[in-house]
Amino acid sequence: MPTLARWYIKAALVYFVLALLAGVIVQARTVIDLPSRLAALRPVYIHLLTVGWITQLIIGVGYWMFPKFSRENPRGSERLAWATFVLLNVGLALRVISEPQVSIRAEPDLSWMLALSAVLQLVAGWLFVINTWARIKER
């Protein structure tokens, strides 16, 4: 298994555990007396689950298992693949930090961070498609 695929899959597992923890906190606030501000973790829970867990697991397995691009570059550009990993994870981290703050305090100062997180994740998605597209071919 390529090193990058291992990084994606291990990161996905970490995000899965964090998403489950966030989900428990969001639901527990309705059962026990926790601050209602914890409801701001709901979007974080969804992003950890969908981008952190599901998307990264799919990308990691895809990077590993999709057909080879060429003998010289079996998985396309390794630099592009690592850039995808970094941008996706930095974008997700910025979202986890900024989204609850923006929703609780409605701070315009942090709105830029939320927008940047979305742009980083979008660029990461494009880079993954660009790097993977040629590997999906007919026999």
Image (tube, rainbow, N blue to C red):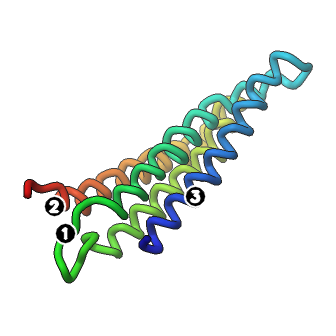
CA–CA distance between discs 2 and 1? 7 Å
Residue lying at 58% horizontally and 60% vertically, measured from the top left: 10
Q: Secondary structure at mark 3?
A: helix
Res. 132 in view: yes
Residues under numbered marks 2 and 1 in contact, where contact means CB atoms less than 8 Å apart: yes
What amino acid is labelled 1 in the image? Answer: Phe
Q: Nearer the viewer, residue 115 or 37?
A: 37
Residue farthest to the front? 139
What amino acid is labelled 3 in the image? Answer: Ala
Q: Nearer the viewer, residue 95 or 25?
A: 25
Residue that mark 1 sits on: 69
Label 2 neighbour load within 10 Å: few <14, some 14-19, many 20+:
some
Residue 85 tag number? none
Q: Secondary structure at mark 1?
A: loop
CA–CA distance between discs 3 and 1? 25 Å
Residue lying at 22% horizontally and 62% vertically, measured from the top left: 67
Residue that mark 2 sits on: 134
Residue that mark 3 sits on: 11
Q: Position of residue 133 (x, y in %)?
A: 19, 56
Q: Position of residue 47 (x, y in %)?
A: 55, 39
What amino acid is labelled 2 in the image? Answer: Ala
Residue lying at 60% horizontally and 31% vertically, measured from the top left: 43
In this rendering, the answer to whether 98 lies above or below 56 is: above
Mark 2 vs mark 1: which is more N-terminal? 1
